[in-house]
Image (cartoon, helix red, strand yellow):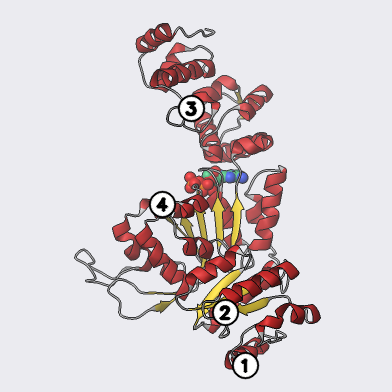
Amino acid sequence: MLDDDETVCQSLRYLFIKQGWEVQTLTNPLNAVAFLKNNPADLILLDLNFRVGTDGKEGLGILKEIKSHTKEVPVILFTAWGSMQLAIDGMKLGAADFLTKPWDNENLIAAIRTQLQLRGKNEDRPTSHSSLDAIIGTSETIKAIKEWIVKAAPTDATVLISGESGTGKELVAKAIHDLSKRQDQAFVSVNLGAIPDSLFESELFGHKKGAFTSAVSDREGRFKLAEKGTLFLDEIGDLALASQVKLLRVLQEKTFEPLGGSKPIKTDVRIISATHKDLSDMVVRETFREDLFYRINLLHIHLPALSERREDIPLLVNHFIQQFNATQNKKVKVESHALEWLEKQVYPGNIRQLKNCIERTVLLTAKNSLGIKDFKPHLEAKPGGSNKFPKVGELTLDEMEKTLIANALEFYAGNITDAARSLGITRSALYRRIEKYNINYDA
Ligand SMILES: Nc1ncnc2c1ncn2[C@@H]1O[C@H](COP(=O)(O)OP(=O)(O)OP(=O)(O)O)[C@@H](O)[C@H]1O
């Protein structure tokens, strides 16, 4: 512990010893590196606002030195209230977490415990792995993701899951919860993209009867519902800036106030967030708060698009076939050439799209053996074999129309009726365009 305030050191020393931790304190921060050489630590608590410096820059300098001396040892920063930018700068230099003074003992202990667990100290390894089994895939990426989940789950660290739509972000969030010590408590999911800004506080923090005109009774918010459990904040990149401030305050202070309520309520929830957007880019463009970004992002995992792990497709197809056979009381099998074909297709909607396709095919078929033709109508054709919309200036409208039609015709092997239906036009309208653009296709 590095803090030039003797009283702070003393009270924290007492608090930590009660947790059974061995504590060493240093009140002259300028000797930090030499001190750490002789007294190796599992974790460092560093106050950035030393009295020797006025703006905390000295603290950042010491952090830099510590990090170059011992990269792996997590450093938790203390900053004075109101010096959030200092904390952010510290996170950029490699700090593991930050807390503001005056601190709350419980929050401080939780933050330390999380970091110790993440570094393999005091680990509570999960016993049941059934939620991991629900994540189908044997590719190297999926194996690494599962190992990461096992490591991250027992901690209370905030987690940010990024990845395209349908890549399994919610499934991973649920697995983390199921393998955590909160597994017997609620897992509450909230889609922030679907909540209008005006309802954000009421939805998340709840309201008291009469707080606003339509509040005819008390209502509990998601934080209350998730108490002692996990709150999954889906589509966090869609949160308006005004709501981001409100969320940050709750995550910092671990208390919230229902609308119309008179006193703050303590909250103990683990926050897992997900987004398909590039949050660091949003931070640069100032559409996402940097302090909130660091708060929700102690741990980060990126889920690959299905196209980046095609080798998992046959396994997924067979898994979904089994699942829908069971729910629809069928005995359907997939022919091997259809499995190969499915492996090569483009899935902009990722696993969700593949799953939907299998579900519709199993539901609508009267056969027991499914071939390519059975799946085709249920897998929507996508332009250009890519899930990226062309950028402005890349294609003219005519070129885009031509490409889209050619792709639909290729996808439906020249079947005009199916291609026209997928494009939302009549057969004669499709014929007119084929002629206009002089498109060759195999009928
Ligand atoms: N590896 C997997 N194994 C089995 N099923 C999966 C896997 N990944 C995703 N799924 C299934 O695909 C569907 C979509 O997954 P999920 O809702 O977790 O995706 P998401 O990334 O959260 O999507 P969105 O961003 O659109 O909310 C779900 O039905 C889920 O059960």
| Number of numbered discs visible in the structure rendering | 4
Characterize the local packing of mark 4: few (<14), some (14-19) or many (20 or more) Cα atoms within 10 angstroms.
some
Residue ID for mark 2: 108
Q: Disc 4 vs disc 3: which is toward the camera? A: 4
Residue ID for mark 1: 10
Structural distance between the alpha carbons of marks 2 and 1: 15 Å
Q: Which amino acid type is shown beneath numbered disc 2?
A: Leu
Q: Residue at x 50, y 43 (%)?
A: 165
Residue at far left of view: 213
Taking the image in four quarters, ligand 1 sits in the one at top right
Q: Answer above or below: position of 304 versus 170.
A: above
Q: Secondary structure at mark 2?
A: helix
- What is the quadrant of residue 217 in the picture? bottom left
Q: Is residue 376 left or right of residue 311?
A: left
Q: Nearer the viewer, residue 310 or 178?
A: 310
Q: Disc 1 vs disc 4: which is toward the camera? A: 1
Q: Earlier in the sequence, mark 2 or mark 1?
A: 1
Q: Disc 2 vs disc 3: which is toward the camera? A: 2
Residue ID for mark 3: 380
Q: Which amino acid type is shown beneath numbered disc 3?
A: Glu
Q: Answer above or below: position of 229 versus 333.
A: below
